[in-house]
Amino acid sequence: MNNPGLYHMLFVSTALFFIGVYGFFTRRNLITMLMSIELILNSVCLNFIAFNKYAWPGKMDGLFFTLFIIAAAAAEAALAIAIIINLYRSHNTIDVNAAEEMKY
Amino acid sequence: MPDFLLLMKSELMITLIIFILLIIKLGKGLRNEQILTLIQVLLLVNTAIAAIITEPGKLFGEMFQSNSLICLQKTFISLALYLVSLAFSGWFRKTEHLTEFFVLMLSSVLGMYFLLSAGNLLMLFLSLELSTLPVAALANFELEKKKSAEAAMKMILSSAFSTGIMLFGISLFYGATGTLEFVQLAGAVHINNLQLMALVFLISAFAFKLSVVPFHLWTADVYQGSPTPVTAFLSVISKATMAFVLAALLFKVLAVFEPAWHWLLVWLSLATMLIGNLFAIRQTNIKRFLAFSSIAQVGFILAGMTGTAVSGTASVSFFILVYIFSNLAAFVVAGILSDQFQVEDLEGFRGLRKKNPFLAWMMALAVFSLAGIPPAAGFFGKIFLLGSGAYSGHVWFILLAALNMVVSLYYYLKIIRLMFMEESAADPVIYSVSRSEKFTLVICASGIVFTGVFSWIYDYIYRISS
């Protein structure tokens, strides 16, 4: 068995990205949609680390970018959950189909 | 004075205002009116500081850059922010958490300043997050309203998703070139399949923020559900920044991909104009109406970006200046109507000339400018945008864009007809207009009239764009 190379890593991260996009478009539960977005962000992190390790081993840009993505994703998730809790208080559900007061 | 203080003057000033507000929040005893007056004075100072045009310079290893054009763009944003703080004073006085509101809004503006000055993709990502996340919280500011919660949910999900898409594009650029700095990136990129995919991801993310057509679905809902000051902030300031940044990215960093993104912008622009116009026709809510009209305006901005680097940047910057005045005036009038009588329907404009001639004439001027009718500056803004688009030589494209302006006349003039030619069935109510609202409207009106007439404004913008 060979050691995993750049293409293996990119395959995993790209698959993760599109699983995230698919989940975001098909799931109707807000928390699950948020999880899909986290999948997308994690796939990007994986991308950066793989590129940093295999393609540009001398530079640290990718690793630093990953750290910032993790921090920003945490902030985003905190805010999104606060908004979802507030939505739950007014709508009594976290199904996106219930939030349909405004359309077209 | 060290470079650091001079180049980052706007950012430091906004940070200072945020800290002042936080300290005020700790103490007690200041009433809303006093805090609001203080904020207005500080924002006026901020506009004056931003208007000092400095020499070009770079800080923090090219993370942060500044030049005359960026200074000017920051001045536009500061001016618009000052006008927003003046215009919605009625709403601000009533709101319970005034300081929090402004802390969030100013954080977002701080993000926008850094976004304009970004010289590195990491900086671009971080400042984009800083400029969009607080706005989602602002959209939720009327906690007891169902619509506000729905708008915030749509805003946070779509902006988080678009951030994810943009990051994926950035990671592909990093993989292909090994650098994140704009200057090195501009030299290292070249057209191949991987980088074209990265380009599409990056442009789609900005299309989300600018509400370009396939990505516009969140716009109308968020505009309608948010409180009116937030809607004005989103539609004027946030959109202006994103247009500036997209133009800078396309012309400075991704110029190599010109053959690829040129056609992308042509089709996106046509689709945006057409869909924006068609959906604006059928709206009955004034905020949704203005949302779709602003989508249509973005179509024209994209048409300007299909031109050469200098003409594209200059015409977009000039149009944004005009757009700030005209769109803000429309939102102020809509805000006054919705604030005093909870009327958010277009029917609220029926017979407005009888009820309050001042508001009716201001709205008429704003609508004329948005539609692009000659004496108003909107006409010149659109002439420059289409003129810039015409450099590429697609006559049919410019013709279709001009035809779209005709379509837009239909729904813009519908408001004029409602205000001036139709009588309202109810007894005439006099809408009272406070002094600060009147002041904002007068500034906007003079902006609409004079930015078009004084040709040195465009000449100046054109000179510093090259």
Image (cartoon, coloured by chain):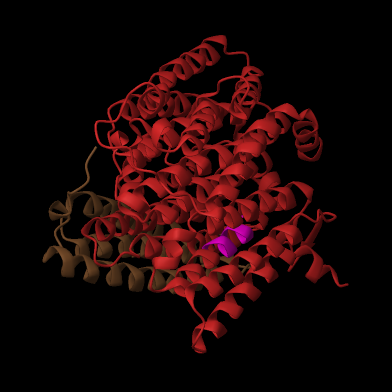
Chain colours: A brown, B red
Horizontal and vertical percent position of residue B282: 27, 27
Q: Nearer the viewer, residue B173 or B216?
A: B216
Horizontal and vertical percent position of residue B464: 80, 40
Quadrant assignment, res B316: top right
Q: In this image, B264 relative to B460: left or right?
A: left
Q: Nearer the viewer, residue B326 or A17?
A: B326
Q: Residue at x 35, y 34 (%)?
A: B349
What segment carries the magenta color? B108-115
Q: Residue at x 35, y 65 (%)?
A: B141
Horizontal and vertical percent position of residue A2: 38, 64
Q: In this image, B150 relative to B16: left or right?
A: left
- In the rendered image, the residue lying farthest to the front is B427
Give the answer, above or below, for where A14 lies relative to B23. above
Is any atom of residue B175 visible in this view? no
Quadrant that contains the N terminus of chain B: bottom right
Quadrant that contains the C terminus of chain B: top right
- In the rendered image, the residue lying farthest to the right is B1
Give the answer, above or below, for where B96 lies relative to B62. below
Is any atom of residue B347 visible in this view? yes
